[in-house]
Image: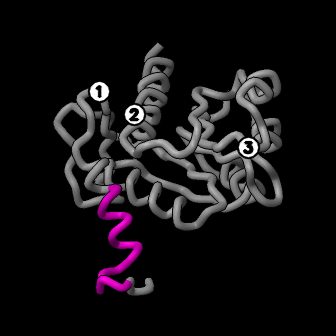
Amino acid sequence: MQPISNGGWENELSIAAVFEDAHEPSPTLKTVGDRTSTDHEPAPGSGPSTPRTVLIVEDEPALRETLRVIFQFHGYKTLEAGDGEIALQILNDRDVDVLILDLHLPKLDGASLLQRIDSPPPMVIIHSAFEFFTPDEMSKGVGSKVFRMIRKPIPPPELLSAVSEAVAELERSDSS
């Protein structure tokens, strides 16, 4: 990390600001406990005993790292991919519950990645600026595989809430 002019550390300040926003989740936010990836204990009754796995597919390293820290802080196991080919390999090799997917990726874009994954896919949350693909194009092409589409930038508590809703949907389908 590079020191900034006020003597602090740029990345620590940005992550600290995100933690401040994400530390107090809204009442509807559901935290899933993962005792292996964080020292924080989950709230009683906040989720299943088995932590859920979130795959973060984002080509911007700083954003990917920030999302990883946030999700681990909230008790999720995380996996990361900086391009679509790595994400496809992870999806073929590992069980993933929620896929947070940017669309503009090197090697294999997000839309092509979605076309290549088998059904049922993980719960897919597209997290994109939609500069190359519109939400309508995504709905027509792979909409059945997408749980939610979110336009960047989004406050961390709102993204956490979307993941929590995806996990709740998984739990409903697992229990039926």
Q: Amino acid at mark 3?
A: Glu
Which residue position holds label 1? 28
Task: Give the vertical position of 93 relative to 138 (above or below).
Answer: below
172, 102: nearer the viewer = 102
Q: Residues within 10 Å of mark 2 (few under 14, many from 20)?
A: some
Check whether the beta carbons of the residues at disc 2 and disc 1 lie within 8 A of each other: yes
* Residue appearing at x 30%, y 64% in the figure: 16
Quadrant position of residue 159: top left
Quadrant position of residue 129: top right
* Residue appearing at x 61%, y 63% in the figure: 60
N-terminal of the pair, mark 2 or mark 1, is: 1
* Residue appearing at x 64%, y 59% in the figure: 81
Which residue position holds label 2? 161
- For the residues labelled 1 and 3, the Cα–Cα distance comes to 30 Å
Give x and y (percent) for residue 50: 37, 41
Q: Amino acid at mark 1?
A: Thr
N-terminal of the pair, mark 1 or mark 3, is: 1
- For the residues labelled 2 and 1, the Cα–Cα distance comes to 7 Å
Mark 3: secondary structure: loop
Give the residues in magenta. Answer: 5-18
Task: Give the vertical position of 176 relative to 121 (above or below).
Answer: above
Q: Amino acid at mark 2?
A: Ser
Q: Is residue 8 magenta?
A: yes
Judged left or right of residue 106, residue 44 is left
Q: Is residue 80 magenta?
A: no
Mark 1: secondary structure: loop
Which residue position holds label 3? 131
